[in-house]
Amino acid sequence: MSPADPPYSGPDLCRLTACAVVDLLKRGEVSPRDLTEASLSRIAETSPAINAMVTPCPDRARRAADAANPASLLAGLPIGIKDLTPVAGIRSTCGTPALADHVSNTSDPMVLRLETNGAVIVGKTNTPEMGAGANTFNPVFGMTRNPWNTTMNAGGSSGGAAAGLATGEVWLSQGSDVGGSLRTPASFCGIVGLRPSPGVVASPGGDGFNPFGVEGPMARTVEDCALMLDAMAGWDAVSPLSYPAPAQSYLATCRADAGKIRIAYAPDLGGLTPVEPDMAALLSDALTRLQAPDVTVVEAAPDTTGTDAAFRTLRGLGMWTGFRATPSAVSDRYKATLRQNIAEGGALTVDDIAEAHLTRARLYDTMRQFFGTFDVLAGPVTGIGPLPVEIEYPPEVAGHPSRDYIDWLRFAFLATLCGLPALSLPVGRDARGLPAGLQLIGPPRGEARLLQIARRLEQATGFPPTPIDPVVTH
């Protein structure tokens, strides 16, 4: 560890990767209870500084650990679940006041699959209210802080998951993503986050036919991310878009030789959104370092015209759909920015929606052809790094004013709109010492190859996967 890297003083078990710990579990060298106690200890140590695991469930976790099957995929590994996702018997608030004391009676199908595959849930991680926003704060639990500098934000909406992973509270954590909700906090906290294609992970949500919102794995290494995806993936009849997991595990494919890799680097995704100069320089330097005999990087971008308008329209439609299905006793208490987004969705015309669908089809075809030449499309996760935790969203990026709280997230829109897998890979730190991720977008249903390429690039970045102690600053 270089002198510039923060120290780590937590339990030794929490320092290990998920893959290493699962190997220990399967060999009987540690027990699920050992890991659960280590995780709970680390949560208690770090929570005052970062406020990531907002609802620990120690009794439930200990019972699950004692009953864990060592022959299962995760063999009793403790994980975190985002507070948008119901887990039976645990307080599930979605960060909104009307649900502050709500306890779920049932678990999301994705949670059941994880538990069947040997996951031990130790608690719920913090999220913005109803997942709306890329800075994790809400009126129920307050702010989650960036572990690399606690005056800064951790991103969102899976900010609690990312911050907890970075400090070693758990080895794996579930996130969800519409407009970068999984990718942004992964970038800000220096961990790996994968948004899979719709249907890879079966989770019906409120509108099971909407492909925008997906569940995905978050971890400290690419291999760990692949392991968690194996535990999450598969067909379930409750999820109409879901389909079976591949015959070869994601982890096995991830570990295989990636062969020749062709990367298209688009610094602003074809003019989609501005980038701060320091972020552009950091990512450009990372791409230069990734060049190798087996890795070719070419600056090239697809035509992304219409991405922003189509994403906003279809996201708005989804928000209006969810609002119509939500009791008014809950929605009447939403924050102002959330109510504004819902109202915009309700004002859409049928022509607006039709135009967005046609644009999406055109963009998908553009990307399909683009991936005939390149293996992945690389670019920023966001055009700016973490901001002070009190700021909901940047007022401007590179001199361009932000229209609203999602405007600065436009780098996330293309993958979501086209149903493409996208991964945030930590590649360096800015002048303030805060992490930054490189977004890698893969072809349709290309999760396995994307993970394989990300692992090869991870080996070249030199970014340490070791957890850190929170850097408490004032």
Image (cartoon, rainbow, N blue to C red):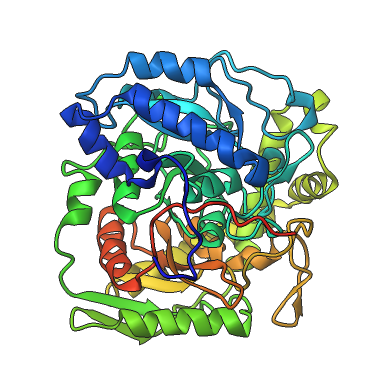
How many numbered discs? 0
Task: Name which residue lies at 62% across and 39% down.
Answer: 47
Give the image location of residue 199, x and y in percent: 39, 41
Task: Name which residue lies at 43% across and 17% down.
Answer: 62
- Quarter of the view holding residue 259: bottom left
Residue 239 visible? The answer is: no
Taking the image as shown, residue 469 lies to the left or right of residue 170, namely right
Task: Name which residue lies at 46% across and 20% down.
Answer: 61
Give the image location of residue 304, x and y in percent: 52, 74
Give the image location of residue 153, x and y in percent: 67, 57
461 or 464, which lies in front? 464
- Quarter of the view holding residue 19: top left
The quadrant the C terminus occupies is bottom right
Please say if 247 is above or below 97. Answer: below
The quadrant the N terminus occupies is bottom left
Taking the image as shown, residue 170 lies to the left or right of residue 249, namely right
Please say if 140 is above or below 355. Answer: above
310 or 229, which lies in front? 229
